[in-house]
Amino acid sequence: MKIINSISHMRKQVLLWRQERLSIAMVPTMGFFHDGHLSLMRTAGNKADRVVVSLFVNPAQFGPNEDLNRYPRDLERDAKLAEDTGVSCLFYPDVKDIYPPGFQTWIRVDGLSQGLCGTSRPEHFRGVATIVAKLFIIVRPDMAIFGQKDFQQLQVIRRMVMDLNIPVNIIAHPIVREPDGLALSSRNTYLNMKERESALSLFQALQIAEKMVASGNISVPEIIRAVKKHIQSFSNTKIDYVFLGHPESLRPCREIVGEALLALAVWVGKTRLIDNTLLKQQANQAHQIDKSKGSEI
Ligand code: PAF
């Protein structure tokens, strides 16, 4: 595996692969790899001839009082894990090269960046969109793999590549979970034992919602109430938001028709965790609703 720090060196490597007509898949990351990251890398390896993993803890996507300084970092460990997973190149640029003095060019994806995480993290998606666009310009991958845990991020990036005609195929990867259901995240390392128990409330709340929908309850206020009640029954939890709405527009809805995104952000102690699921209205429910309106599907 090649470990590349300089942008010009990265560009030269990509040029060589392009001359050989090799396809490139990219996995953008902020490092401190867990099985979720490794799973994205394996998927990338199954889809392209070469896999580039970027490792860059992007200061522009952290707010002033967020965890930029304590974000976990271990380049040596990450390099070993990436190499063992079959990655072709680990690209870890420096902050000073990505944001040179005088930097003032930003990418904003307006509507999709507002609401959900955008409410409490107003500049977050500007930072994400800008770094991802820069990485795409440097590496010019054919495709890039993103985890579905950051569902809003995925939609922001999809919108950005569409709006800016960036020729990168965006591939969503399902959420990877611990055996008990906790979604994998580098931030899970912040949790002590008691908080780790409370962190499970997110996944359990998603399951409660899934069961409600499966048993025919499609009322958004009722589902949100049940989700909040469950999370609040755990110690040290503070809900940032519970969102239920359209998975593409990220606009809230009052009833679940077809498919809806249930997304959560919850503080567990000093750690902010996110999780989500797609709630699917059963086919027979859709049939009943349509009949009640007087038309058959
Ligand atoms: O999901 C992440 O780890 C980051 O937001 C990303 C996409 C690597 C951009 O810094």
Image (tube, grey):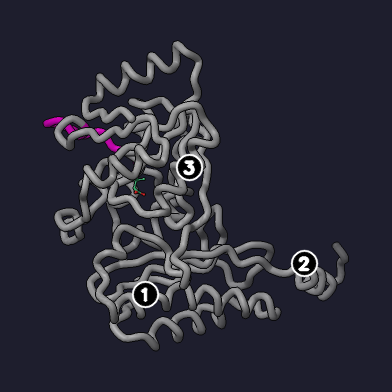
Considering the image in quadrants, where does the N terminus appear? top left
Structural distance between the alpha carbons of marks 1 and 2: 32 Å
| Mark 3 residue crowding within 10 angstroms, few (<14) / some (14–19) / many (20+) | some
Numbered disc in front, either 2 or 3: 3
Under circle 1, the secondary element is: helix
Left/right of residue 98 with respect to residue 39 in the rendered view:
left
x then y, percent, for residue 184? 40, 61
User: Circle 3 is placed at which residue position?
Assistant: 42
Specify which label sits upstream in the sequence, 1 or 2. Answer: 1
x then y, percent, for residue 156? 44, 47
Identify the residue at horizontal 76%, vertical 68% (top origin): 286
Let me know if residue 101 is in the magenta part: yes
User: Circle 1 is placed at which residue position?
Assistant: 199
- Quadrant of res 187: bottom left
Image height check: is 235 above or below 241?
Answer: below
Kind of residue at disc 3: Arg
| Disc assigned to residue 44 | none
User: Circle 2 is placed at which residue position?
Assistant: 283
Specify which label sits upstream in the sequence, 2 or 3. Answer: 3
Kind of residue at disc 1: Ala
Identify the residue at horizontal 45%, vertical 57% (top origin): 149
The region drawn magenta spans: 98-107
